Image: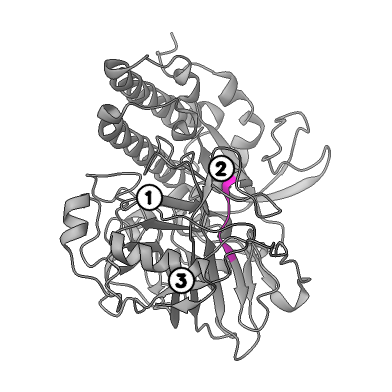
Amino acid sequence: MRQRGHRRSPFMTKTAAWVAALTLGGGGIAVVTANANAGDSSQDTAPRSGQQQKWTAGTVDCPDVGLKLPAVPRQARTEVDRNLSRLDSQVADAYQRLIASRGQGGEDFVRNSILGPLESRRTATIDRIATAIGRSGQRPSGLEASAPCTIKPVADTTGADQNQNGQNQNGQNQDGQSQGQGQQGQGQQQGPSPDDFVDITRVRPNVQKPRPGRNASKGLFISRCGRNETRHLNPDNVIVAPGVSNGAHHMHDYVGNASADGFSTNDSLAAADTTCSNGDQSAYYWPVLRLRDGRQEGDANAPGGGKDANVGKILRPATVSIFFRGSPRSKVTAMPRFLRIITGDAKSFTNGPANANASWSCTGFENRRLKDKYPLCPEDSRVVRTFNFQSCWDGQNIDSANHRTHVAFAQANGVCPRGFRAIPQLVQRITYDVDPENRRIAVDSFPEQLHKPGTDHGDFVNVISDGLMKKAVTCINSGRRCG
């Protein structure tokens, strides 16, 4: 009898044709001929019918429950956020199990030993989320359909051998660690692939800006907050996983608020010191960028670091620029204190690119921006990460259940969507010195997201005092440069 939770679901069967490629054993590269009807998702990377394809990795692909939630009563948000964080941990654990067990079986093994137990755990956690919402409002229906997960195949499109991405043939990666702290074959799958990089000089200019209108707010307000000289790092995320240690499963760089971590409250943030010279106490943070050149970091065996497949030396930014700009179509209004905004999507590799927003470029080439590739920069040019945050606010909420719907991006012409008002747009621009001869960079990510460049994202908790915010708005609306 098939055990409950190990049944064959429609979500599982679409990956059946690919599982053999992930379980043929031992860290080798499997060559398979795929069935063109195996999946119909635009996110599938399946080869065309009859085409041979090398598969070097697979990852666990689960529906993002947070994006499917209805309005969550304020009383239930803490419990809901903690259970959403549990879902992230469950996926990370299943991914590590997938990599560690390569070669131990075929489709039935993956379904019964990895996807089935994962579905059971997710079902129970999703039920707790629905119950928490139901205590203060209407219990949502249909969330359980998000419990089943699949295996998303990842192709080697370059014909690379096992020495790429910091992997050598004796089972030791060039970061000086065993593969995933002893997990068989793990190191081979954890880095970005060679086709995740592109020579920036071969990219055509693609940056377009709306033409300023008569009522444009053209000023700039700058917060000079350093480049994390204090080494304020942790794998928490107080926005999406409040009260949870290692809620991000990757390390964050922080500037601004000196106390920010997963256990911060509005009161603790408001009472904290800041690295910003103008007294701005906001928390600005983003995933660290690592260089995979054979050096270990201090978190090589720690949560958020090596235990979550984030390995290599953490690069300290060469420069960090934090500034707020106006709207090309209207004046801006003050953003409320403790407003939370996330830009980009840490899970865009499995969620799809709809919410991917962070961009990559090189100094001297910033009219060319990439969302799904790391740039290869010329000599004397720095790698640039830019986060352009949402610039429209609903006028009521400092956060929302999915941490997105209370803010919005302006439309292509610069006008905010109906029901939203223009606020100062935060821009975070970070640069790094990367030797052109050693280009193995990787952004920290959830383990199953495989360090893809499109998963980059920025986070912001506004702790600017009302007085300083008023000064910023006046500066921006009057067309001056302040800060």
Q: Position of residue 5 (x, y in %)?
A: 41, 18
Q: Give the label, 2 or 3, closer to the camera.
A: 3
| Mark 3 crowdedness (10 Å alpha carbons): few <14, some 14-19, many ≥20 | many
Q: Dot 2 corresponds to which residue? A: 350
The residue shown at (32%, 55%) is 307
What separation in Å lies between label 1 and label 2 (alpha carbons)?
A: 24 Å
Q: Residue 272, how many percent across, how many down?
A: 18, 64
Q: Secondary structure at mark 3?
A: helix
In front: 1, or 353?
A: 353
Tell me which corner region of the image, top left, top right, bottom left or bottom right, holds residue 286: bottom left
Q: Is residue 355 above or below residue 69?
A: below
**What residue is shown with label 3?**
475
Reading the chain from its start, which is encountered first: label 1 or label 2?
Answer: 1
The structure residue drawn at horizontal position 59% and vertical position 68%, both measured from the top left corner, is 360
Q: Which numbered tag is attached to residue 340?
A: 1
Residue 19 on image: x %, y %: 59, 36
Residue 172 visible (yes or no):
no
User: What range of the chain is rendered magenta?
Assistant: 355-359
Mark 3 or 1: in front is 3
Label 1 is placed on what type of residue? Arg
Q: Earlier in the sequence, mark 3 or mark 1?
A: 1
Q: Is residue 115 magenta?
A: no
Task: Tell me how far mark 2 sits from mark 3, CA to CA.
Answer: 41 Å
Q: Nearer the viewer, residue 204 or 100?
A: 204
Q: Nearer the viewer, residue 270 or 135?
A: 270
Residue 231 is situated, as x and y percent measured from the top left of the image, at 27, 74
